[in-house]
Image (cartoon, helix red, strand yellow):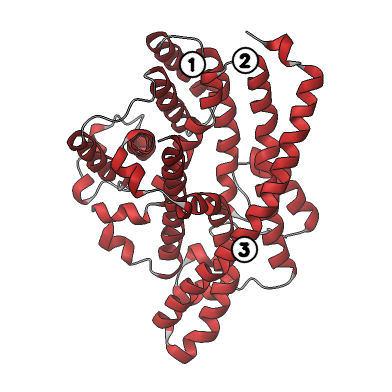
Amino acid sequence: MKSNRLEALEAMRGLAALIVVLYHALMAFWDPVFKLVLGTPFFLFFSGDAAVAFFFVLSGSVNCRSLHRTPTARNLARGLLKRWPRLLVPTLLATLFSWSLYAAGLYRFEEAGALTGSHWLATLANGATPGFVPSFADALYSGTIGAFVSQGSHYDPPLWTMHFELVGSVAVMILAWVTGRMSLRNGLIATLLGAVLIFQIAPYFTATFIAGMTVSFVLLRRGDRPAPDNRMMAGAMALAVYLLSYAYPTGMHAWIYDQFDSFWRDMESIALHSVGAVVLVYAGYTWGPLLRLLSGRWAVTLGELSLPIFLLHVPVFGSVSSWILLEASPVIGLENAKIVAFVAALAVTLPLSMLFVRLDRAGGTWITKTIDQLLTRCLPVAATQGV
């Protein structure tokens, strides 16, 4: 069950990354399709915002399980010390990849965006703003510091998530350590009080991480028991689809906007997506039919590729896809060229992601080994037992 659980969660992470790719493909090539699927359950397959909320909820859950099991000062220090360097490796790799495309003159997103009428593509997902001049020094800063403090990146716009990933992970690791020895009831009360405090000083996206942490805490306190009967879980999954397919108050979601007070209306999508993501993460831990469906080596591989797919596909859209679109459209027509450009983006992104995984894994292994050695010197295991 434990192996299947991890495989299911990895598979869902990978599927969420592919949803982001589809979302951006519509923005780049087929913007009118949005109007056809908005307000319907089918928007779930194109909802990049919902996929990111799922990433954050899952991250909050997974990053806290070891601290909930063993809430020691050593484990907390290990988690906190690792988080920024561990995020830095993929962030820097993605940033330097995009800079190299700029330096080699391989980006053609402005021309391609003008051809498709996509402002999103013409500005490389709104990253190529007026006055932006790429340079190696700037890319180095952006990949190591800028992406984590500025909530964005000119080089690779999906890196806006790294600011929230860092802040959210740190917040919930501390909260998980505080609640690690508490009962279910006291832990939930402490989590609520901690959330109120965190919201005063941290970005609103932190709520998604706290939601994920709460799932982990509740499951561990309940002994990771299997989900209730299939009918109840099927109904919960239907609710998750409904909530995660929300984008605007239109169609089947038209009534939702009026239910939120004006103070919360800018955050209704985050709230709805978070609840839907919590259901999916809970199902990924406990629901047998889903665990059996999303199992196997393919699930693990898809999960491993999820982050590089998420980070690399926009630069690929702006270079390879844009070049193909411009060169092929006079020959096979614009609509056919769009299809070829999208397929080419997938064909290029996947092998690049495999290389990315190897580099990221090597960097992550070195970081983990270095931090463990540092902690062994500064916080010996014997000195932290029971702390």
Tell me which corner region of the image, top left, top right, bottom left or bottom right, holds residue 223.
top left
Crowd class of label 2 (few under 14; some 14 to 19; many from 20; radius 10 Å): many
Tell me which corner region of the image, top left, top right, bottom left or bottom right, holds residue 283.
top left
* Residue wearing tag 3: 352
* Disc 2 from disc 3: Cα separation: 39 Å
Q: Can residue 88 be seen in this view?
A: yes
Which amino acid, by three-letter code, is at mark 3? Leu
Observer-nearest of 126 and 211 = 211
- Can you say whether 256 is above or below 141 in the image? above
Which amino acid, by three-letter code, is at mark 2? Thr
* Residue wearing tag 1: 194
Crowd class of label 3 (few under 14; some 14 to 19; many from 20; radius 10 Å): some
Residue 132, x across and y down, in percent: 68, 58
Mark linked to residue 72: 2
Q: Nearer the N terminus, badge 1 or badge 3?
A: 1
* Disc 1 from disc 2: Cα separation: 19 Å
Left/right placement of residue 163 relative to residue 49 reads right
Which amino acid, by three-letter code, is at mark 1? Gly
